[in-house]
Amino acid sequence: MARLRKLRPGPIAVTVALYDLWKRLTPQQRRQVMAMARRHGPTVAAKVTKLSRRRRP
């Protein structure tokens, strides 16, 4: 019996989806997104790095 795997989008698919979403935003919404990314980006990146180090043996 074949196992069913959950499909996970690759990095290119995620990039194309985010680009499409970005194009649909108004200029004001784009500024808001950039402000949030500047404020919260370093925290999120640190947590992702910590989690990825913990997963690897």
Image (cartoon, helix red, strand yellow):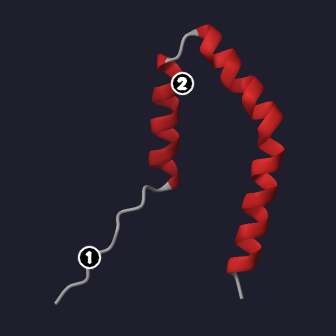
Q: In the figure, is residue 16 to the left or right of 33?
A: left
- How far apart marks 1 and 2 lie (CA) works out to 33 Å
Q: Where is residue 40, by image quadrant?
A: top right
> Residue at coordinates 61% horizontally, 15% vertically from top-left?
29
Q: Residue furthest top?
A: 27
> Residue at coordinates 26% horizontally, 76% vertically from top-left?
4
If you read the primary sequence from the N terminus, does the residue marked by circle 1 or circle 2 appear first? 1
- The disc label shown at residue 4, or none: 1
Element under label 1?
Answer: loop
Amino acid carrying label 2: it is Trp
Quadrant of the image containing the N terminus: bottom left
The answer to whether residue 8 is above or below residue 55 is: above
Quadrant of the image containing the C terminus: bottom right
The answer to whether residue 22 is above or below residue 47 is: above
Q: Position of residue 37 (x, y in %)?
A: 74, 33
Q: Position of residue 33 (x, y in %)?
A: 67, 25
The answer to whether residue 20 is above or below residue 48 is: above
Element under label 2?
Answer: helix
Q: Position of residue 32 (x, y in %)?
A: 69, 19
- The disc label shown at residue 22, or none: 2
